Image (cartoon, rainbow, N blue to C red):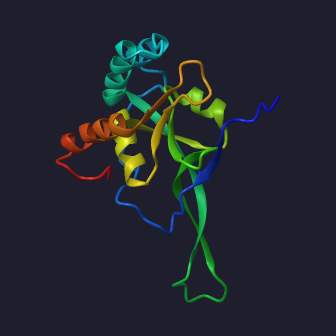
Amino acid sequence: MDRSPPWSISVRDPAVRGPHELHRPAFSGDTGAADPELVAHLAALDGTAATRLPAVRALATARVFVPVTAALTTDLASASPGLDKHAEMALVTITGRDGRRAVPAFTSAAALLAWHPDVRPVPVEGARAARTALDDGAAAVLVDPGQPTQLVVTGSELDQLAAVWSEATGGGPAG
């Protein structure tokens, strides 16, 4: 039996700047614990719209964590002999077996670090994670991948979730 996860991890090329940056300080004093309302809605998921809609609504305003990692870049404008190397933070995405990409989002910092201990958890609103996914050309936000309470947000739900962020920020990208 194949126990490998149905995705692979990739890092967005930091040389290709998207219309957003995940660097704004937010959630000061955040302990990294899961949002209790979101966790309750995820635990109640039973495959019906009656439980799914409240979970997606809770995700819109909940703080979640997206993974970023350092990615080496080369400063080609350097006048020194050889090339200087720089590291920039890049969003980690996962690619499903069908080739579609998703932005993973985690209910807690501990859940993210258990999933991949070498990444940095960045706190963002769920709606911002959705806007970031669309801005990066991803097809989904995957909440707590591999967990029994996993939630996959795609299609019109992803569009509507991203619209919450756009409306809150005056229509702009997740920057």
Left or right: residue 162 compared with residue 147: left
Q: Is residue 27 in view?
A: no
Left or right: residue 90 compared with residue 153: right
Question: Residue 22: horizontal and vertical position, in percent?
Answer: 41, 49
* Residue 58: quarter of image: top left
Residue at 39% over, 19% down: 52
Residue at 36% over, 55% down: 20
Front-lying residue, 63 or 52 = 52
116 w.r.t. 82: above or below: above
Front-lying residue, 91 or 30 = 91
Question: Residue 66: horizontal and vertical position, in percent?
Answer: 49, 40
136 w.r.t. 121: above or below: below
**Residue sitting at the far right:** 1
Front-lying residue, 1 or 129 = 1
Q: Is residue 72 in view?
A: yes
Question: Residue 147: horizontal and vertical position, in percent?
Answer: 60, 23
Question: Residue 69: horizontal and vertical position, in percent?
Answer: 58, 51
Residue at 53% over, 57% down: 12
Residue at 60% over, 88% down: 80
Q: Quadrant of the N terminus?
A: top right
**Residue sitting at the far left:** 170
